[in-house]
Image (cartoon, helix red, strand yellow):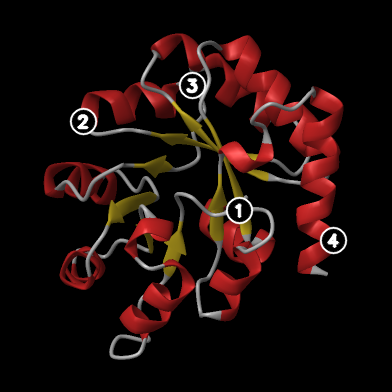
């Protein structure tokens, strides 16, 4: 399964931050039951890594490792089954490592200049963060107007009610985080996932 193609196809990437693998898997499974299939699991804590293996064993699901800055962390994540590496920054050494090892890689940027440099470094999808404070969906439009060749995935502060505006502005996908699970039971998480997908339809 090609993770880049799955992002394009599914449009929604669930970004999960958790203290341990159990919390991450519970949230992911609740979202999976609601129809979400692409997950970015933030792995600042290595004890979260087993969640990636669990998610990848769900039929049709793709788990990516987020919050990765070093090549060593990337290698550890790949060993736990990560299909793609997501960095919270654009780090040239990490980009070179992933490219050299044929590991799909998403870099995170904030400005048009950073986005262009990431594209020049052959980053297939560029994450724009934090999307809401930078200007919401209008900011995506502003970046794409002179550079329509960029493949942007905004994340950060996007809500269940406005995520569609980012797709309408030209984003190839959106990253949804706390809005999917904050202050919610597992059943409510599933319902939020269903709601998101219903708005896509």
Q: Give the secondary structure at mark 3.
A: loop
The residue lying at 37 percent from left, 68 percent from top is: 135
Neighbour tally class for label 2: few under 14, some 14-19, many 20 plus, Cα within 10 Å: some
Residue 169 can be seen in this image: yes
Q: Are marks 1 and 3 in contact (CB under 8 Å)?
A: no
Q: Which label number is shown at residue 80? A: 3
Q: Are marks 3 and 4 in contact (CB under 8 Å)?
A: no
Residue 149 can be seen in this image: no
The residue lying at 78 percent from left, 43 percent from top is: 192
Distance Cα–Cα, label 1 vs label 4: 15 Å
x then y, percent, for residue 54: 66, 21
The tag earlier along the polypeptide, 2 or 3, is 2
Q: Is residue 164 left or right of residue 82?
A: right
Give the residue at mark 4.
198
Give the residue at mark 2.
70
x then y, percent, for residue 127: 38, 57
Q: Give the secondary structure at mark 4.
A: helix
Give the residue at mark 1.
159
Q: Give the secondary structure at mark 2.
A: loop
Q: Is residue 74 above or below residue 24?
A: below
């Amino acid at each position: 399964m090609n993770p880049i193609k799955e992002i394009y196809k599914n449009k929604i990437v669930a970004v999960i931050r958790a203290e341990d693998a159990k919390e991450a898997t519970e949230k992911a499974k609740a979202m999976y039951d609601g129809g979400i299939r692409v997950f970015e699991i933030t792995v600042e804590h290595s004890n979260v890594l087993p969640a990636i293996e669990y998610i990848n064993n769900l039929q049709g699901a793709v788990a990516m490792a987020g919050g990765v800055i070093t090549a060593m962390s990337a290698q550890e994540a790949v060993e736990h089954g990560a299909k793609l590496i997501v960095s919270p920054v654009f780090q040239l050494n990490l980009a070179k490592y992933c490219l050299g090892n044929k590991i799909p890689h998403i870099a995170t940027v904030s400005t048009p200049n950073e986005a262009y440099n990431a594209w020049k470094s052959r980053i297939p999808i560029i994450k724009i963060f934090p999307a809401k404070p930078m200007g919401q969906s209008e900011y995506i439009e502003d970046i794409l107007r002179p550079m329509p060749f960029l493949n942007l995935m905004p994340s950060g502060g996007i809500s269940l009610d406005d995520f569609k505006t980012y797709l309408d502005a030209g984003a190839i996908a959106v990253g949804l985080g706390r809005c999917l699970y904050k202050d919610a039971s597992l059943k409510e998480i599933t319902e939020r996932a269903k709601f998101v997908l219903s708005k896509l339809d």
